[in-house]
């Protein structure tokens, strides 16, 4: 499909570029947008990325805007409202709007700006909001461009972006600390006990943690009664021997049960099939407060609310909950560790779980805008919540043995670091394309 003849200039349909107007302070968003739109096949002019599409940035900007620009993408921010160049470019764009009777300027709202802070040219425009989620706003922008038949003359746009990224060097000689989601188990019993209880044996201690291999064989880090028959087995023996199961697997199950009980004690919820998740009962005001990896005090929600809109326009709220998964890994990394995986569990506002298919789709969309530091922040937040902010935590507190965990995840120091200011994309081009296409093709619902 092509744009109607009203945009044919000088007898030729040469206006096939998108021109990005922005203030220097908003350069990261301008570059990010340039690369993503190029990957979608659009020709984009942005003076931070000058070589995509096989041509350089125009010397005569005014002429390029008038004769070769299909639409101007204006990044509206507090800085761009007062800077001379973006103001001049928008003024020219609004003049073209009046001359051609089209919405030549597509405004992208970068900051939280009040209506009385906008100038008369920009105050009555419909903005695409980039304040909260660049990914979601990008979807809206591409829908807008498709609705006005914006040309996409770069069928190899994704390859151009990929090649451009590969040519950029963001490595520096500075050392960098790389965080993991692994918490060292600093101390634990050397032995587990294979217990053979008598026929009339009953568990009278509700805090005793054990694993029943069968009705006649129980495993635990402690023996509840010295009169009961048992044998001591080293837990790091991964042979099945005559036990029918590797002792290391039994130790893994026991530590995992310790963590489950700790979470329940701290008011986490548990589903019938064993999913642990946080709710507004977990924290007094629903916030988990913690010092991040830089030592700065911050917070994340234990549970948040989203709204879904059906094809008919009906809006329905639902809730997402942080759902930690703790996996003891006693041999894999050389030292025993506890791996913390952060998942999301979704319910309606009454706490009823969403259907699996719906839950997976919505969970995917929520997590799309969470980059590595978002996930790392939630690892730190859950650790702070679970371990009460102490440097170590004894999972077996009050028992006759100790399982001591470090509160801070393990980290390694790399000899080189990445200068994130030079990074063009926080995710791969392929992931970006998948994200955008999924959003554009899914018309069943739309999230705010």
Image: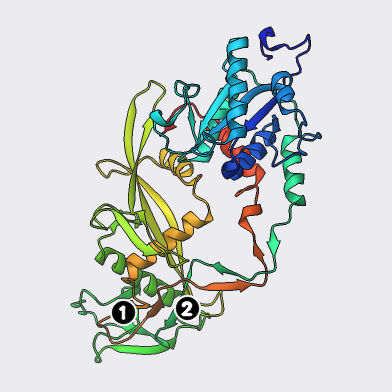
Name the element at disc 2: helix
In the rendered view, would you say 271 is above or below 388? above
The residue depicted at 34 percent of the width and 46 percent of the height is 304
Residue projecting furthest to the bottom: 226
The residue depicted at 62 percent of the width and 33 percent of the height is 85
Q: Mark 2 vs mark 1: which is more N-terminal? A: 2
- In the image, 392: left or right of 158? left
Of the pair 219 and 412, the residue shown nearer to us: 412
In the rendered view, would you say 145 is above or below 316? above
Of the pair 92 and 283, the residue shown nearer to us: 92
The residue depicted at 40 percent of the width and 73 percent of the height is 407
Percent of width and height locating residue 204: 18, 77
Percent of width and height locating residue 130: 50, 37
Number of residues whose C-alpha sits closer than 10 Å to that of mark 1, classed few (under 14), some (14–19) or many (20 or more): many
Residue projecting furthest to the left: 204
Percent of width and height locating residue 34: 66, 37
Quadrant of the frame with the C terminus? top left
Which residue is identified by label 2?
248
The label shown at residue 46 is none
Q: Is residue 93 visible?
A: yes
Name the element at disc 1: loop
Which residue is identified by label 1?
396
**Rendered image quadrant of residue 346:** top left
The residues tagged by marks 2 and 1 sit, at their Cα atoms, a distance apart of 18 Å
- In the image, 124: left or right of 98? left
């Amino acid at each position: 499909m092509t744009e109607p003849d009203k945009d044919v200039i000088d007898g030729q349909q040469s206006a096939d570029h998108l021109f990005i107007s922005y203030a220097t302070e908003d350069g990261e968003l301008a570059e990010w947008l340039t690369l993503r739109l190029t990957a979608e096949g659009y020709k984009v002019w942005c003076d931070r990325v000058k070589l995509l599409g096989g041509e350089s940035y125009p010397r005569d900007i005014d002429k390029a805007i008038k004769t070769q620009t299909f639409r101007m993408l204006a990044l509206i921010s507090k800085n761009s409202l007062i800077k001379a160049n973006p103001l001049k470019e928008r003024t020219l764009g609004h003049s073209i709007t009046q001359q051609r009777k089209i919405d030549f300027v597509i405004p992208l709202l970068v900051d939280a700006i009040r209506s009385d802070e906008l100038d008369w040219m920009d105050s009555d425009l419909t903005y695409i909001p980039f304040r909260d989620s660049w990914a979601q706003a990008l979807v809206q922008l591409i829908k807008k461009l498709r609705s006005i038949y914006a040309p996409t003359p770069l069928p190899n746009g994704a390859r151009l972006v990929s090649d451009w990224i590969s040519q950029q060097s963001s490595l520096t000689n500075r050392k960098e600390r790389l965080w993991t989601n692994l918490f060292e188990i600093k101390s634990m019993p050397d032995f587990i006990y294979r217990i053979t209880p008598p026929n009339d044996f009953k568990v009278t201690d509700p805090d005793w943690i054990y694993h029943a291999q069968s009705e006649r064989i129980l495993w635990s880090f402690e023996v509840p009664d010295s009169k009961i028959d048992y044998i001591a087995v080293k837990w790091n023996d991964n042979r099945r021997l005559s036990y029918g199961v590797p002792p290391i697997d039994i130790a893994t199950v026991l530590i995992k049960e310790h963590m489950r009980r700790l979470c329940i004690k701290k008011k986490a919820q548990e589903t019938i099939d064993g999913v642990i998740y946080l709710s507004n009962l977990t924290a007094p005001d629903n916030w988990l407060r913690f010092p991040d990896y830089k030592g700065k005090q911050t917070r994340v929600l234990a549970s948040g609310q989203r709204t879904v809109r059906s094809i008919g326009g009906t809006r329905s709220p639902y809730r997402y909950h942080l759902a930690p998964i703790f996996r003891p890994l006693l041999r894999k990394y050389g030292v025993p560790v506890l791996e913390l995986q952060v998942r999301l569990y979704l319910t309606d506002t009454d706490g009823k779980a969403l259907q699996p298919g719906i839950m997976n789709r919505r969970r995917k969309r929520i997590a799309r805008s969470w980059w590595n530091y978002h996930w790392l922040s939630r690892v730190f937040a859950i650790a702070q919540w679970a371990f009460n902010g102490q440097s170590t935590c004894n999972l077996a507190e009050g028992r006759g043995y100790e399982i001591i965990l470090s509160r801070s995840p393990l980290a390694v120091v790399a000899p080189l670091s990445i200068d994130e200011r030079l990074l063009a994309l926080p995710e791969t081009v392929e992931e970006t394309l998948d994200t955008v296409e999924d959003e554009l093709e899914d018309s069943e619902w739309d999230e705010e």
